[in-house]
């Protein structure tokens, strides 16, 4: 599959922005479906099952994150690009929780949008393989949510799965300590609990792939 093979569902309520972004999308993608509000976006998602979702946060009827929360109840795999003028921490945290591929802050240029589409395409390719290579002879099997290490299959507990999925959905991006703690534990926990979880996951995968960025957080190098 190439960029032109994608079906992109693009939801944006501002006509001028929608027309401009559509012009760019249609340079690279053969099939672009547009929606003017959140409810229409959900209806079109059910009808067409697009390859990629491009959602604005601020829309009438249902905003982009509300739309995505409904979709993520049954679909954790479809790549999602979120667009917004917001940069507040709350929005960023909610986006991480909903497994977004890219978070574009308006205004953005053509190259930024194309980079986001290419990142979505990479996720689709990995999903089709049903595994994600983490390192030499170490893979994460998407369907079973288990680690394949050489000839050995290793089970992960719930928090290890949550942590690894968060890191995989944000490859090479630093997730802060607060973001990881917010999405893995319901209550406030000590920083030692996160360190212990990272240590356990490294034992089951590799200590090389999960990098600690001092004073910031962790990232998955793939």
Image (spheres, grey):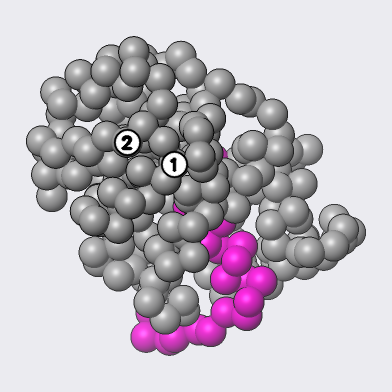
Q: Residues within 10 Å of mark 2 (few under 14, many from 20)?
A: some
Which region of the structure is painted magenta?
Answer: 150-173
- As for residue 163 lying within the magenta part, the answer is yes
The quarter holding residue 95 reads top right
* Any part of residue 135 in sight: no
Q: Residues within 10 Å of mark 1 (few under 14, many from 20)?
A: many
Any mark on residue 219, and which?
Answer: none
Q: Is residue 149 above or below residue 35?
A: below
The quarter holding residue 9 reads top left
Residue in the picture at 33% in, 26% down: 113
From the image, tell me which residue sits under label 2.
Answer: 35
* Residue 127 placement, left or right of 195: left
List x then y, in percent, for residue 91. Answer: 64, 37
Residue in the picture at 43% in, 67% down: 74
Any mark on residue 38, and which?
Answer: 1
* Residue 6 placement, left or right of 130: left
The front one of 6 and 211 is 6
């Amino acid at each position: 599959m190439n960029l032109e093979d994608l079906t992109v569902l693009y939801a944006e309520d501002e006509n001028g922005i929608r027309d401009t972004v559509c012009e760019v999308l249609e340079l690279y993608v053969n099939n672009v479906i547009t929606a003017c509000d959140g409810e229409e976006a959900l209806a079109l998602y059910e009808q067409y099952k697009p390859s990629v979702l491009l959602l604005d946060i601020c829309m009438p009827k249902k905003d982009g994150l509300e739309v995505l929360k409904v979709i993520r109840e049954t679909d954790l795999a479809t790549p999602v690009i979120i667009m917004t003028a917001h940069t507040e921490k709350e929005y960023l945290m909610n986006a991480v929780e909903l497994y977004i591929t890219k978070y574009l802050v308006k205004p953005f240029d053509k190259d930024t949008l194309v980079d986001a589409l290419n990142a979505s395409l990479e996720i689709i390719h990995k999903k089709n393989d049903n595994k994600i290579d983490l390192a030499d002879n170490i893979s994460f099997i998407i369907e079973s949510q288990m680690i394949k290490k050489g000839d050995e299959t290793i089970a992960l507990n719930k928090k290890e799965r949550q942590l690894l999925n968060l890191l995989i959905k944000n490859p090479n991006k630093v997730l802060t300590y607060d973001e990881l703690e917010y999405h893995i534990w319901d209550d406030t926990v000590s920083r030692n609990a996160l360190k212990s979880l990272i240590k356990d996951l490294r034992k089951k995968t590799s200590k090389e792939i999960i990098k600690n960025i001092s004073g910031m957080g962790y990232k998955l190098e793939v």
